[in-house]
Image (cartoon, rainbow, N blue to C red):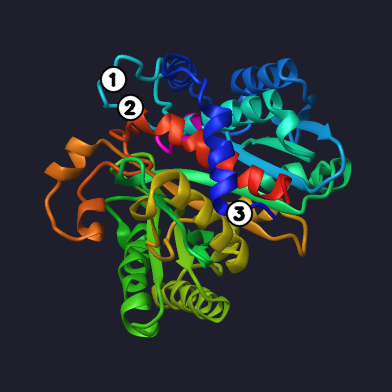
Amino acid sequence: MPTAAAAASLALDLTSGLKTPDLEKLYQDLHRHPELSFQEHRTAGILAGRLGSAGYAVTTGVGGTGVVGVLENGEGPVVWLRGDMDALPVTETTGLAYASTVDGVMHACGHDMHVTWLTFAAEALAAARDTWSGTLVVIGQPAEEAGGGARAMVADGLQERFPRPDAVFGQHVAPGPAGFVSHTPGLIMSAADDVHIVVPGVGGHGSRPEASVDPVVTAAYIVTRLQTVVSREVSAADSVVLTTGQFHAGQRPNIIPAEARLGLNLRTQDVKVRERVLAAVRRIVEGECQAAGCPTPPEVNLGAGFPATVNDAALDAEIAAVHRELLGAQGVFDFGPAMGSEDFSLLVPTGVPYDFWFVASTPRDAWHAAPGEELGEKITAVPANHSPLFAPDLSVLLPGVQTLVGAALHKLNG
């Protein structure tokens, strides 16, 4: 296994010829042309074309729109590098010269940055294949935002059709002072569950509520009562977020609808806490519907979800050491587990170690101008992922390539 310093030094050498305008050209092009989950045809085509030109054996259409590039380079470890490709149904308000040209769709989570990093890292490693040995597998994953992309690739044989990895790496752009990297051994991201609820009622005329069972009122009570789950049923020592993100009911002001629909999002970091909260949700929904006299039992169904992302602690320590050599000792910190979630870990075959980290990307002037003294205070005050104002600083394009290259070389030269 090479030292962290050796891997970092080689990563810097391999990326020394990268030109900032080239990085910016690809990133800005991807940002202008965002594509929603499982619709990433243009993005996948660009990635597949670049990988093919660099010498990778490319397979497209994996799990729908996924791309897998394989570069066999002699005996040695197998390393997977993953980047997700999809955008969000968000209307961009950044005012950037390269803002989205697609109405109502934006790369508000930074996956355009991820594809750019992945592309240039793959090209740099391919161009310098005389410096390492092993097999590099580059994965462009669809539909992370929709929650089904990783599962779709695995169902399509990702883990059987391509070389089994010895390590899997991924990274995510995030708010924070541009150029810093956050490494967390063990739990780094929470599990997530979507919960879909149908509240049944008896529809009728708005002038005669006594002849109806109003599901809007019942659903409103459910939303209000759900706020007590975290505050009154979960220990303060446990991290839980329960959000009602959807409330749909009715078509006209004077019609009491026959049903109301709620969409919840639950974030947890402990399996037993997750089970306790889901049980509380079911109890509250059923209880409120019974109290309201709903004609039939409510529906409570789990939708898309992500497991917790738990880094291999030893591997994370090794890669963090490489990144300290790349960015300086002060360039790497541990922000602790995030309540955000990812499907990255679903790609990884059972028993294979993986490491996932964050690359901070808030422009320095915006970061310094943000109110607060502590890191957590400032992060809440700057545009974050999923915001229509989210705009990663272009200065993190090259460091993000280098962190991926450094991690890959650490294993490929082992």
- Whether residue 149 is visible, yes or no, is no
Alpha-carbon neighbours of circle 3 within 10 Å: few (<14), some, or many (≥20)? some
Prevailing secondary structure class for the magenta stretch in the rendered image: loop
In this image, 201 relative to 137: left or right?
left
In this image, 146 relative to 390: left or right?
right
Q: Nearer the viewer, residue 64 or 413?
A: 413
Q: How many marks?
A: 3
Q: Which mark is residue 3?
A: 3
Amino acid on which disc 2 is placed: Glu
Q: Residue 347 location, x and y as percent?
A: 70, 50
Q: Which mark is residue 333?
A: none
Q: Does the segment drawn in magenta span residue 110?
A: yes
Q: Nearer the viewer, mark 2 or mark 3?
A: 3
Disc 2 to disc 1: CB gap under 8 Å: yes
Q: Which residue bears the numbered disc 1? A: 96
Magenta-highlighted residues? 107-112
- Give the answer, above or below, for where 380 lies relative to 81: below
Q: Nearer the viewer, mark 2 or mark 1?
A: 1
Q: Residue 386 location, x and y as percent?
A: 38, 41
Q: Residue 276 location, x and y as percent?
A: 51, 81
Task: Look at 83% across and 34% down and name the residue there.
Answer: 72
Amino acid on which disc 3 is placed: Thr
Amino acid on which disc 1 is placed: Leu
Secondary structure beneath dot 2 equals: loop
